[in-house]
Image: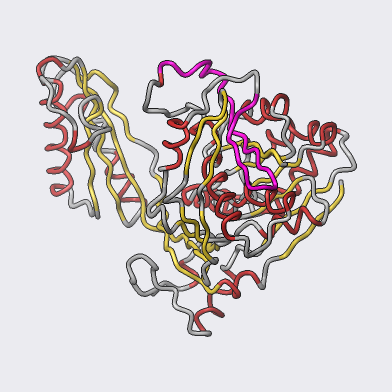
Amino acid sequence: MVRVGAGQGFYGDTIYGALNMAKYGNVQYICFDCLAELTMAILQKDRQKDPSKGYTKDITVTAKNLLPYVKKKGIKLITNAGGINPEGARNEVVRMAKEMGITGIRVGIATGDNIYPILDELQEKGISLADYETGEPFTKSKEEILFASAYLGAWPIVECLKQGADIVITGRTTDTAQFLAPMIYELGWAEDDWDKLALGVLLGHLMECSGQATGGNFSGDWWNIPNMENIGYPIAEVYADGTAIITKPDNTGGRVSIDTLKEQFLYEIHDPSHYVTPDVIADFSAARFEEVGPDRVQISGVKGKPKPPTLKAIMGYPNGYMGAGMIGYSWPDALKKARKVDEIIRKQIELYELKVNDIHTEYIGYNSIHGPLAHPVDEEQLNEVYVRIAVHTDTKEEAVQFGRLFPPLALNGPPFVGGLANMYTVRQLLGLWSVLIPRAEVESRVQINVEEV
């Protein structure tokens, strides 16, 4: 039996979930999913400023808090916090270990997800880099691409574990790979144990968003979730006979139930009968959830099909700039005043001949969350409304110029400003391009390196 705990659901998640896991989870592994497409773009910006960066900065906090448990309890850590720079993340963990006087632990990295160096080679081989969703042909030069990463699966992590790693750091892996790898390693699953691999993928999927499976962000009776201030992260308890249970650490808040798990189950699942990962194509259509005890739900009925011949990869490229501004108005006629601002700004764009590709307006307090689906309200009863307008421009100068339209509204616009006219810092936007690459082109370049501190 192996017990695998979740330690992080996103870059910036609290450390206390992982700490509770280490203290009370009775787990052999704590696994961290830190990456999203947006995260990769953020990390690339970090590395552009400092080539030694490009990994998630909270790995320093993770190392500081959990390295003592790696040493004393033998808990292994698996994370994709390496992002754009797994070597840099490894160096940071080693630095922290030395600073804390911890020795005798092995840190492994799995690399090879970075396909930027081989983009030309792929095209010379006739491999299409067309967008796999739209079919749009790839016409950008390599110089226009900021990063290019393929999604690796669980097996490079398994190889690190085979080489004795106590901590495994990767770059871009699927969200579930970190959780699946220790199940493969501990229970001896084979590369064609499709049903078992599919079960492991579902368990990983249920854990990848940390507290979202244990009562966080729950749309049921969320007000009854116990001790939400100290929510426990999910644990997968997996047995050699294929029995699998999701639970959580003792002494923590939250709830593990069929309903809390099913909400996470539906997250990002487009086709439950054909969930594609690098390790297996999973069929969740007959998955069963059964409560077998307090905060214990058994998962079964998952089937798997052979893994796909290609791997998904994403490429990031500069996509202009965002300029934005916001201003608030109070009763009476708050919404009417805010709408007048939208009218003024749009006319000033034409008057001053600003070039904007897209413009978006939202009224915070009225429709900024539900958008066009917002229920009509009695506009006369609105105490306050903020209007936020954002534009997409080709140049930074145009985005800056747009933001400067807002401060003068304090004196030149509608009356009774309830919030200071505010222009946002201009942000560079990154576009993402998704492609499918023959897996052999990627996996032949995967490298494993395990070092002892």
* Residue 269 in the image, given as x and y percentages of width and height: 41, 49
Between residue 413 and residue 311, name the one nearer to us. Answer: 311
Above or below for 74 versus 429: above
Residue 235 is inside the magenta segment: yes
Residue 181 location in percent, x, y? 67, 52
Q: Position of residue 380 (x, y in %)?
A: 9, 17
Residue at 52%, 28% (x, y): give it.
Answer: 256
Q: Which quadrant does the N terminus fall into?
A: top right
* Left or right placement of residue 105 versus residue 16 in this view: right
Q: Quadrant of residue 141?
A: bottom left
Residue 301 or residue 152, whichever sits in front: 301
Of residues 56 and 247, the one nearer the viewer is 247
Q: In the rendered structure, which segment of residues is drawn in magenta? A: 223-249
163 is within the stretch colored magenta: no
The quarter of the picture where residue 23 lies is top right
How was the colour assigned to the protein in this rendering? secondary structure
Above or below, comparing residue 114 to residue 356 in the picture = below
- Residue shown at 14%/49% (left/top)? 350
Instruction: Between residue 165 and residue 202, name the one nearer to us.
Output: 202
Residue 209 is left or right of residue 410, and the answer is: right
**Residue 55 x %, y %:** 63, 48
| Placement of 254 over or under 359, stated as above or below | above
Q: At x 43% / y 16%, what residue is drawn?
A: 224
Apparent side of residue 393 relative to residue 286 in the rendered image (left or right): left
- Total marks placed: 0
Relative horizontal placement of residue 46, taking residue 87 as reference (left or right): left
